[in-house]
Amino acid sequence: MKLYKRKVFDQIQPYVGDNTVIVLHGARQVGKTHILFYIRNFLTNLGKKVFYYDLEYPDLLSDLNKGIEVFISDLAGKGYVEGETAYALIDEIHYLDNPSSFLKIIADHYKNIHLIVSGSSTFNIKSKFKDSLAGRTTSFEIFPLSFEEYLEFKEIQYIPSKVHAPSGISRLIQLYREFVMYGGYPKVVLEPVEEKRKQYLLQMIDAYIRKDIRDLAKVTDIKKFNNMLKVLASQSGQLLDLASLSRETTISFPTLQKYLNILEETFVIKRVSPYSKSPSVEISKNPKIFFFDSGLQSILWFSSFQGTLLGSIFETNIFGELVKKFGRSAIHFWRTKTRQEIDFIVEDSNGSILPIEVKINFQRFNQKAIETFSRKYTVHNWKVIGLEGNKLPRNGCFPWET
């Protein structure tokens, strides 16, 4: 299997070898195991001693649940000598009965064993870790492939930032439309047959429902949960209306809140908060709902990939790209009670803000809301992201130029 370098590796590498447990967490099939394999090759090429554990194997999980002594003994059986520096890569750490205790003991008492672990279910990790690992872990969120990674995985020799010729831009537009259609899950990207891509996503959804939702989150009414997923997929990019959602799914408010929390904590959706400094004028309570992956949204909504580029799915895709670049907490939206609206407000750590409008066709952009927001917040820079029509000369950009 060819291993591709993910961009997040550049963020992880400085912490490899530090006295901290590196935690990779993200949705199922998002590429965490691939990254662990890449790290294993990286360390092996440096002459380091590396051990890999996949806790989806029941016998291995049973052994590690017996305690640290069994784990150390197993390492010794694989060639580890006590006191030497070694790296242990543990996939699906959340399956342990008590992962926090396991990681805490290793971090505190076996400082020569550097742990790099992955987990799909952040809600499960958080509930067990609590505060016991404070100062002992460094976490990295793993998302589906970015467009740049999408091209690399498909071994397409385009560097988007360096393409300026019309023929090259036309080809990138075509590739980006495919990226929106299929999404960024690595296994889906690498599969050339569309029907198999669809089946991979359906299998991933099934595994998510069976393992994360039914077994770990203890959700019993799977039929209602599935129906809620389909409804939410049709509403990605819209204001979350709990009353309407409750009526449509026949799920109570408290249960809906529980389900939405689970979906967020397992990196399927994000409730995006509004940007507001004037609650009396701007809507400041209702969040928007977004999926992280446009291919997953499409399969949940239509049970197939859509040949026609839909505005909702394009906007979901752009949301995912913004999250990968700026982080989940940096993305907001703006909407007034008079229904003036801007799709995204990106706020960096310094408090600087960038309004972004998303239109499939640049010519469908109306500047009125951006002008109102810019005057109100004294903003001088804004962007319109599009794919079709004539790109706006000053503020227009293609998705790969954001």
Image: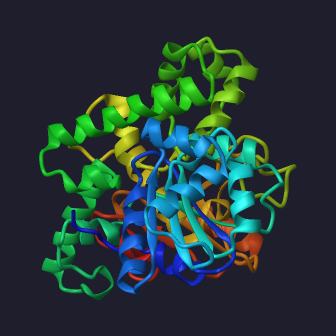
Up the image or down, 385 lies above or below 60; here it is: below
Write the residue at 69% across / 52% down: 102
Report whether residue 333 is seen: yes
Q: Position of residue 267 (x, y in %)?
A: 55, 47
Q: Is residue 378 left or right of residue 179?
A: right
- Nearer to the camera, 293 or 115: 115
Instruction: Give left or right: position of 194 versus 294.
Output: left
The answer to whether residue 144 is visible is: no
Is 225 drawn above or below residue 67 in the view shown?
A: above
Check the picture and name the quadrant holding the C terminus: bottom left
The part of the image, by quadrant, that contains residue 115 is bottom right
Q: Which corner quadrant of the image does residue 163 belong to?
A: bottom left
Q: Quadrant of the N terminus?
A: bottom left
Number of disc labels: 0
In depth, the one of 59 and 306 nearer the eye is: 59
At horizontal 51% and vertical 55% (from top left) the residue drawn is 74
Q: Is residue 35 left or right of residue 87?
A: left
Residue 327 image position (x, y, % from top left): 60, 65
154 and 12: which one is in front?
12
Q: Position of residue 37 (x, y in %)?
A: 37, 65
Scheme by which the image is coloured: rainbow
Which residue lies at the image location 46% right of the left edge and 54% below the top edge? Answer: 53
Quarter of the view holding residue 376: bottom right
In the rendered structure, the answer to whether residue 214 lies left or right of residue 274 reads left
Which x, y percent locates residue 228? 53, 23
Q: Residue at x 66, y 40 (%)?
A: 124
